[in-house]
Amino acid sequence: MKVVALVSGGKDSTYNMMKCVEDGHEIIALAHAHPPEDAAQEELDSYLFQTVGSSAVATIAECMDLPFYLQVIAGSAVTQTLDYELTKDDETEDLFALLRNVKNRHPDVAGVSVGAIFSSYQANRVQHVCDRLGLTMLAYLWHREQVGLLQEMVNNGVEAILIKVAAFGLGKGELGNTLRQAMPKLISLSEKYGIHACGEGGEYESFTLDCPLFKRRIVIDEIETITHSPDTYSPVLYLKLKKLHTVPK
């Protein structure tokens, strides 16, 4: 099946692409929804999309040498229930516009790769859009046990760094850590406090620098640390990826 991959820049969308290819599918394009250019901050607190690191996602398409499609997130979470029905000005309609554009450009596309693990809110909306466009949602990570999944990602060559932290026990010291470096602490926090080891509760977000599907790897040249919410016990901090380049592998 020819597949368009929804990519956030993070480990989950990357690893789901790897599972698609492992299952015999062909990734023919990447698609990404991003904040408006005039947004005050890169972090939109979107219910549906990861927006931190958005400005750097084009480098992933460069690393994979694939067409890259963008859609501005113009809507918001108008409908916040788990189930979704077509709603004017909801951010789900931005996802619909994005995938409709891809399908118009690539009529042979039949599947959509999505890195959802436990978010029914996200999965239900992607499924709703896929149904409207006659596409098959491919979510290989759905309901996987998270500690084992995190270890599997690292062991199978997903090289990603933490670019946002938003949970008790995570702070500035973890920003920029690789998954391999952060994994012992993430597993410990999961065992002690029940946080989601893969960040499905919004505890952290990541950005992929390399994986087996990449023809080139990403190098970060300049970053800026942004304080989104200065909470004493669980501050929300993220890295703005200001300058990057890719190098041959």
Image (cartoon, helix red, strand yellow):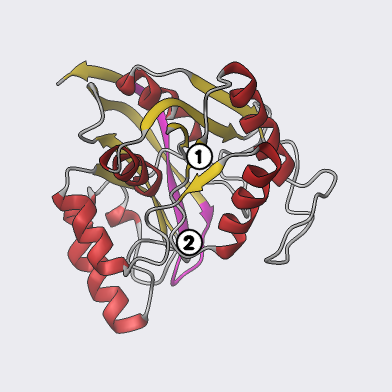
x, y (%) of residue 173? 28, 55
Q: Main secondary structure of the magenta part?
A: strand
Looking at the rendered structure, the number of numbered marks drawn on it comes to 2
Residue segment shown in magenta: 228-244
Question: Within 10 Å of the Cα at label 2, are there few (<14), some (14-19), or many (20+) other Cα atoms?
Answer: some
Q: Dot 1, how many residues are within 10 Å of its Cα: few (below 14), some (14-19), or many (20+)?
A: many
Q: Position of residue 72 (x, y in %)?
A: 66, 30
* x, y percent for residue 76: 74, 48
* Local SS, label 1: strand
Q: Is residue 222 left or right of residue 97?
A: left
The quarter of the displayed image where residue 159 is located: top left
- The amino acid type of the residue labelled 2 equals Gly
Label number found at residue 202: 2
**Is label 1 or label 2 in front?**
1
Asked if residue 45 shows in the view, the reply is: no
Give me the C-alpha separation between circle 1 and circle 2: 23 Å
